[in-house]
Image: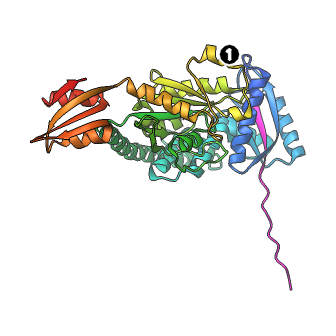
Amino acid sequence: MTRLHSVKQSAPEVLGLAIQLPDQTEAEIEHSLIELSELLKTLGARMVGSIIQKRAGASRSGYFGTGKIEEVRIKAEELGANFIAVDDELTAMQIKSIEAATGLPVKDRTSIILDIFAAHATTREGKLQVELALHQYQLPRLLRMWTHLERQRGGIGLKGPGETQLETDRRIINLKIKKLHEELEKVSKARELQGRKRNDRFAPLFSLVGYTNAGKSTLLNALAGSKVQMCNGLFTTLDPTARRVELPEGHWCILSDTVGFIRKLPHGLVSAFKATLECVTQSEVMLIVCDVSDPQFREHLKAVDEVLNQIGASDHERIYVFNKIDKGISVSEELLAAAYPDHIMISAVQGTNIELLKKKIESIMRRNRREVELSLPIGSPFIGEAMTIGRIYSQEWGEGVVTIKAELPVSFLKMLEEHNSLTICL
């Protein structure tokens, strides 16, 4: 009897390429290649080697110089590489030149990130955002797809079949991009309406923001006692997740987890995920989560700042949360204290200083709350609202009136004054 043996498909082996610019250190470029390797690992591939060329900038025609590309071809053959991965975004001409010189398919950093997003998108919104980013990436690179077709050089007005098909594809993709923008605009309006409703309920919103794999989802679970799926990989959270967090002194807030950022994050992805990232711009305070055990954490924070600038959230109040202290700290606490006053050191995995962080969040919330006594007519819709959003000390029900002593948001109290409700400050 013939036995069947399961054969495990080996991971594709990839040769990585990178350019070291004059203002980059060797440590920075090595770290960027390590990050590229992690991105490839997330896709199930393995980087078996790398080549770095020191240049003032990438060659417009082939990324590397001609001699270096020949070195790439030889090394790829020696290592048995199946793909070439480039640690930058490439033009159609650069991709074509490298593929022609090496005989191997080429993936740039942007297309790798897009593939990861496509693999991890689960909701309709997430899939729409990834599809939009993919089309925006493909549009300027269509020329490369049609080089196998004939290009006739006829008289005035005559075009070869390759050029005709190219124009058709451009028109199709532009129509798809327009349609996706319209669909995402509807999602954005729905999310904005949800934000207004949340504001109407006066639920304070905090956002977890940070570099990919900094431990944001783990922290959300630690703060909210929830079970958001956690994975030790890049871009495992694409769709925003919001949870209610109960705070030590009886308050509560809404905490939202967001997609992680990364260096060289494609601009198209930021614009495509604008609807998702609106929860950051709507939040009262951002919790900037950072893996402080990583020696490159300051560069990660710079990458986060760049994205926050792009989405118009650079002026929001911040709490710097340095995570993964169980793995060690890459710099001294004195330096951290000098550069980031009022930061909080935590380990989300071990629960270290989680209660301290909750107290910090609560202290920020209380700045916009007041202790008051309200006299409201029985049947008023504001009674239930106050019970839901306030910290209630006492309530007395009389003839036609209920008197409530509570701590309530200032914005709620202003609304009561606009409706001529009686407010007596204690």
**Local crowd size for mark 1, using a 10 Å CA cut-off: few (<14), some (14–19), many (≥20):** few
Compare residues 232 and 182 and report the one nearer the observer: 232
Q: Is residue 278 above or below residue 146?
A: above
Magenta stretch in the rendered image: 1-18
Q: Choose top left, top right, bottom left or bottom right for residue 26.
A: top right
The verdict on residue 14 being magenta is yes
Residue 233 in the figure: left or right of residue 355: right
Q: Quadrant of the N terminus?
A: bottom right
At 67% from the left edge and 15% from the top edge, which residue is drawn?
Answer: 335
Using the image as rendered, state which of residue 348 and residue 12 is in the foreground: 348
Q: Position of residue 220 (x, y in %)?
A: 53, 41
From this view, report whether residue 88 is shown above or below residue 11.
Answer: above
Q: Main secondary structure of the magenta part?
A: loop
Q: Relative to 382, is 388 on the left or the right?
A: right
Residue 385 seen from this side? yes
Q: Indicate the amino acid at tag 1.
A: Glu
- Residues 216 and 269: in front is 216
Residue occupying image coordinates x 52% and y 35%? 208
Residue holding disc 1 = 334
Q: Position of residue 205 (x, y in %)?
A: 41, 35
Where residue 180 appears, as percent x and y from the top left, is: 42, 46
Residue lying furthest bottom in this view? 1
Helix, strand or loop at disc 1? helix
| Numbered disc total | 1
Where is residue 229? Give x, y as percent: 58, 50
Task: Give the residue at x 50% y 46%.
Answer: 239
Q: Nearer the viewer, residue 389 or 293?
A: 389
